[in-house]
Image (cartoon, rainbow, N blue to C red):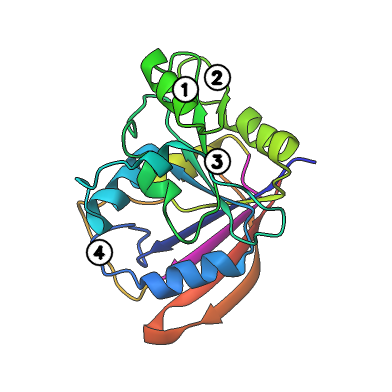
Amino acid sequence: MYPEVIIHNSVSLDHAVRGFEIDLGQHYGALLALEPGAVLAGSATAKTGIEMFMDINEPEKEADRHRPEVRPDDPRPVSVIVDSRGILKDLLHFYRNMEHTKDVIVLVAETTPEDYLDYLREREYPFIRCGKDRVDLRSAIGELGERFGIRRVVTDSGPDLNDVLIREGIADTISLIVHPVIVGEGEKRLFGRAGGRTALELRKAVPMEQGTVHLVYAVKK
């Protein structure tokens, strides 16, 4: 069965994804409440998170070079990272050590550098190779379901990846935590390159603390 795909993001009233203070507790609380089997992120977002919240100079340990045991009863999601250019070479151990994830799977393309693929193989990172110059997300997400039994994928990424999921008709649901602020000019916005018109159906609108609202829409297909 093809996994359900949910876009999740925190945005300003004018759909900026930066330029305001995100309540991380609200953001990740709502994300985990969606009960994802996998949390999907782009390599740029993943690297930015490492640089912002971790000591990027922390060396890789010997234990980091081996895939941890993945238990069927472990409720934590898998981290899935789109990285066709090998941006996260020598950095994936940070994700492997995160408490809220039980495994790391990397999505790559035919043109992904061979030295990055060797890095993944040597450290026992599972990877899915789909697409020529960039990752074929539709096929790769299908393989997540077939190979790893993942039924629901929730994004934790920026506009580029999420816009592709809308543009290519992959996303089933949009989950937005809308913050009471207008950022104005100069910041990247969600859905700025999502293609043509996409019809939505409101499923939930829940007021939260600090004036934020959690909106959930089904994508009409």
Give the position of the N terminus as an image quadrant.
top right
Q: Mark 3 vs mark 1: which is more N-terminal?
A: 1
Q: Mark 1 = which residue?
A: 134
Q: Locate residue 108, reporting x and y percent.
A: 49, 25
The stretch drawn in magenta includes residue 144: no
Looking at the picture, which amino acid does disc 1 mark? Answer: Arg
Determine which residue is flagged by label 3: 165
Marking on residue 183: 4
Q: Nearer the viewer, mark 4 or mark 3?
A: 3
Residue at image location 37% in from the left, 24% down from the top? 85
| Dot 4: element | loop
The quarter of the picture where residue 202 lies is bottom right
Residue sitting nearer the eye, 202 or 97:
97
Measured from the top left, where is residue 5 in percent x and y? 63, 48
Q: Nearer the viewer, mark 3 or mark 2?
A: 2
Q: Point out the frontmost of discs 4 and 1.
A: 1
Which SS type dominates the magenta stretch? strand
The CA span between labels 4 and 1 is 31 Å
Q: Distance from label 3 to label 2 (Cα)?
A: 15 Å
The amino acid pointed to by label 2 is Gly
Q: Are marks 2 and 1 in contact (CB under 8 Å)?
A: yes
- Give the extent of the magenta segment: 170-178
Name the residue that disc number 2 marks: 131
Q: Residue at x 23, y 47 (%)?
A: 58
Please give the name of the residue rendered at 39% of the width and 83% of the height, measured from the top-left corner: 211
Quarter occupied by residue 17: bottom left
